[in-house]
Amino acid sequence: MSETIKTDCVIIGAGPVGLFAVFELGILGLESHVVDNLDKIGGQCAELYPDKPIYDIPALPECTGLSLIENLQKQIKPFNTPFHLNERINEISSDNDIWTLKTSRDKVFETPNIFIAGGVGSFEPRKPPIDNVLKYENKGIKYSISDKNFYRDKKVVIFGGGDSALDWTVELSKIASHISLVHRRDEFKAANHTVNQMRDLVKAGKVNLVTKSQISNVQGSDRVEKVIIKDNDGNEKIIECDEILIFYGLKMELGPINDWGLNLHEKQIDVNTEDFETSLPGIFAIGDISYYPGKLKLILSGFHEAALAAQKAFTRAKPDETLTFRYTTSSSDIQKKLGVK
């Protein structure tokens, strides 16, 4: 049996809110371990939109998902936090205010605090129920973009009508040799500004728009060469292409968390707004996965939630010590933890 890891806090989720929780716990002198079922740090920011601009992070007029994650990693570097990737928490149990967690790799953690910062839970892209789509995955078919320059000078067909589909239609139209956007409806569930940008590109002949149609089949030898689309009347059309991007959204699943006995609001976890603790003492939910009246699913809201949850976590990890609130600008103790000279 593997050795038990004892720590002040286990954070489930290595996205931006989980990373900022590491920082908030760290400046209070608390150690944390981070567990994530993805194979890299960054959560949805790194997995789904690493190149997509983000405009509502305070003091950063514009950043990408990837640059935000890179800066958060720099911010927590002084704490030497261990990350356990490609791993998820399968079981939890408690004894005298201490939680025991077992992972999919048979690691065991003991901690007074669990931070669930798993975004919207475990997620995977929605895929059309077509055998050839699965056959050509990573051979011309993808569900996210990690490097937009990969699509330079290529013929790309994009399926979907939401923000991701239209954002990438606009962005890739700048570098791809040809873009086709295919959607099953005439209406789009995306920001009006982006929809208008897309329609301007269609008028300018830079984007081929096909509505009331869906993917029907994919053809090619070793890689994608053609995609067949079918309209609502059953008529088929062939589009030659180098790459296919499918943005049909994500399937959100809480996974084992669903069985932990937490109070749930649909697929979110109920918390109080004093310290973002759940119905189970010592388990906190922060970021998109938490729910309370007035909840906004914004990264900056998750940062606020992490800061307050860390204060309560301190009292559980160090019940015999007094927590004194200090500003980072005036506390030499905090600056020492951060390596400031």
Image (cartoon, rainbow, N blue to C red):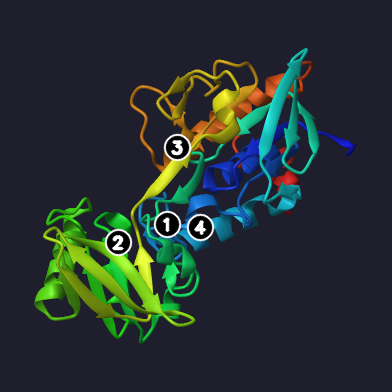
Q: Tag 2 or tag 1, which sits nearer the N-term?
A: 1
Q: Tag 3 or tag 1, which sits nearer the N-term?
A: 1
Mark 4: few/some/many CA within 10 Å (<14, 14-19, 20+): some
Image height of 167 relative to 16, above or below: below
Q: Is residue 275 left or right of residue 228?
A: right
Q: Is residue 119 visible?
A: yes
Mark 2: few/some/many CA within 10 Å (<14, 14-19, 20+): many
Residue wearing tag 2: 165
Residue wearing tag 4: 47
Q: Mark 1–mark 2 contact, CB under 8 Å?
A: no
Q: Is residue 310 left or right of residue 263?
A: right
Q: Mark 3–mark 2 contact, CB under 8 Å?
A: no
Give the number of marks. 4
Q: Quadrant of residue 301?
A: top left
Depth check, mark 3 against mark 4: the one in front is 4
Mark 3: few/some/many CA within 10 Å (<14, 14-19, 20+): many
Depth check, mark 1 against mark 4: the one in front is 4
